[in-house]
Amino acid sequence: MRDKIITNKTTVAIGVVWLFHIAALIGITIGYQEWFVSKTTLNLSISLLLFIWVYPMDTAKKIGAFALFFTGGMFAEWLGVNYGALFGTYSYGSNFGPKLDGVPYLIGIYWGILTFICATLATKITSKAPVKIVLAAALMVLLDFFMEHSAPIFDFWTFEGGAAPLENYTTWFALAAIFQIILHFLKQEGNLKFSLHLYVAQLVFFGYFFLFFG
């Protein structure tokens, strides 16, 4: 019975994830970019609720780790936005929701979600800790790479000079690896199927605009 409930929850969550991402992809393509992009806060908020529900975030260790990744991500982004440190010189636009001293709360949430789901994906591929940590961090950077293309178009964030510098990616990888090391030693497991679909849905969305609207 418990397995059936988990399966049903996962199926519903995956359906919602793809519904929102495919609808946004189609809507933006046919000319409703402003309307759909303005709903980014809603989209990410729903992804967070599904993540909490299905992953699931059901232990003190998981919640504590998520809070740590949220805080660490926010602090790193704060240094970047206000001092040009770590990632380069950039600023956030209006479509990533409310901000704390220039840094959207959703970017901290995104750091947390991405750390967990990429760890789950990497654990499925390998059991060797160093390889798993590097692979999970690389998956995080890969998604960021495709997001960087759409970010200024969708008014998510903009780097001085246009393109994200190399230091953005090296810092992303370093910080992601630190988070992955922490999560590895906490030995927390999550929903593989949901993690895979949430990651792939975002990769498809941002990869699509990178390939066809570049």
Image (cartoon, helix red, strand yellow):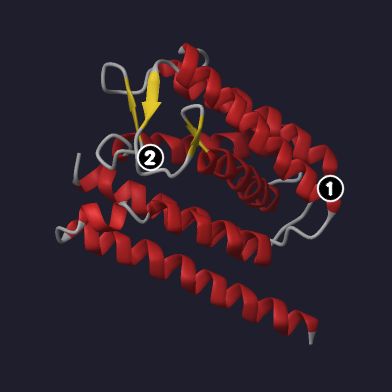
Quarter of the N terminus within the rendering:
bottom right
Q: Residue 83: horizontal and vertical position, in percent?
A: 49, 12
Q: Tell me the element at label 2.
A: helix
- Residue 115 location, quadrant: top right
Q: Is residue 184 above or below residue 21?
A: above
What amino acid type is highlighted by mark number 2? Met
The residue indicated by pointer 2 is 147
Q: Is 151 situated left or right of 196 in this image?
A: left
Q: Which residue is mark 1?
A: 61
Using residue 116 as the reference point, say whether residue 93 is left or right of it.
Answer: left
Q: Is residue 94 visible?
A: yes
Give the quarter of the image for residue 186. Answer: top right
- Residue in the picture at 38% in, 21% down: 90
Q: Residue furthest bottom?
A: 1
Residue at image point 30% right, 40% down: 150
Residue 110: x percent and y percent? Answer: 55, 44
